[in-house]
Amino acid sequence: QGEFDRARKYLPKLNGEYQGESFQLEIQILTAFLEVMQGNIEQAKAALPDLSAISSGDYHRWFEVYYHINKAEPDREDSRTDYLFSRAIGELSQNGAVRYAFNLGLLAIDLALVRNRYFTAELHSLDVEELIPRLYQDLGASEQLESARRAIRAARQSRPQTRQFDSVDELLNEIDKEDNSSESRLILLDQHLGKWPDDEQLICKLSDILYELGKYEQSGKRLIKLLQKH
């Protein structure tokens, strides 16, 4: 605790007017990290700079703080968090920062599980799986992914069953209710695609939700993998 307090007092002294913008942003991220590690969630939120100001080179630092903030205050209805992680993972992957993208993917999976968004966690795991062959060395990555998938399977097995619908129109009406989160809609689709695996309306609805979660480039492949289960 004492070391944290000393660091918090020292950091503002580094953030002077003569420092460059990128340095100031790093200080803000570090300040937010120190706050969240001490459980000061509101202070961490206030200190963390907006993501739009962050370069991809600092994503891993920013998202680590963002992960801890959201883990402390989990919101099952929040799909924006998964969207931000998906976009960052995709950008890091395209830039060749595959290990950073992989690590963010693991954080995204864990955070989705904490928020009881097990289906979203499974989607993140598909992204992570595709990164492993691109790593220079595995360094335990395969085991980490398998551990995450065990947690996802356990979460899926403990989920409550949703109401079963007798027609596609009834199901679509339920999916389109305003108070349904992307996770709730994914669960409804997952539990009914086996009944209507070739229905174009349901497949399009699934594609729309993938886009909502920031999985633009992967939506086609994700559709194929998810539909293969049924």
Image: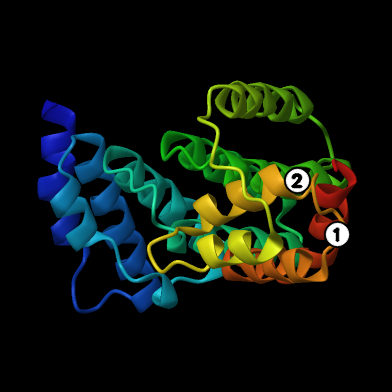
> Judging from the image, what secondary structure is the residue with disc 1 in?
helix
Q: Give the residue type at disc 1.
A: Lys
Residue at image coords 45%, 66%: 177
Q: How is the image coloured?
A: rainbow
Residue in front for this viewpoint, 51 or 10 = 51
Q: Earlier in the sequence, mark 1 or mark 2?
A: 2
143 left or right, relative to 59: right
Residue in front for this viewpoint, 229 or 216 = 229
Q: CA distance from mark 1 to mark 2?
A: 10 Å
Q: Quadrant of the C terminus?
A: top right
Picture disc at residue 221:
1
Q: Position of residue 50 (x, y in %)?
A: 34, 71
Where does label 2 land, which residue? 126
Q: Position of residue 78 (x, y in %)?
A: 40, 57
10 left or right, relative to 121: left
228 left or right, relative to 207: right
Q: Do we see residue 220 in this rendering?
A: yes
Q: Is residue 10 above or below residue 38?
A: below
Q: Are marks 1 and 2 in contact (CB under 8 Å)?
A: yes
Q: Give the residue type at disc 2.
A: Leu
Snapshot quadrant of residue 56: bottom right
Picture disc at residue 57:
none
> Judging from the image, what secondary structure is the residue with disc 2 in?
helix
Numbered marks: total: 2
Q: Position of residue 211 (x, y in %)?
A: 65, 70
Q: Is residue 183 above or below residue 214?
A: above
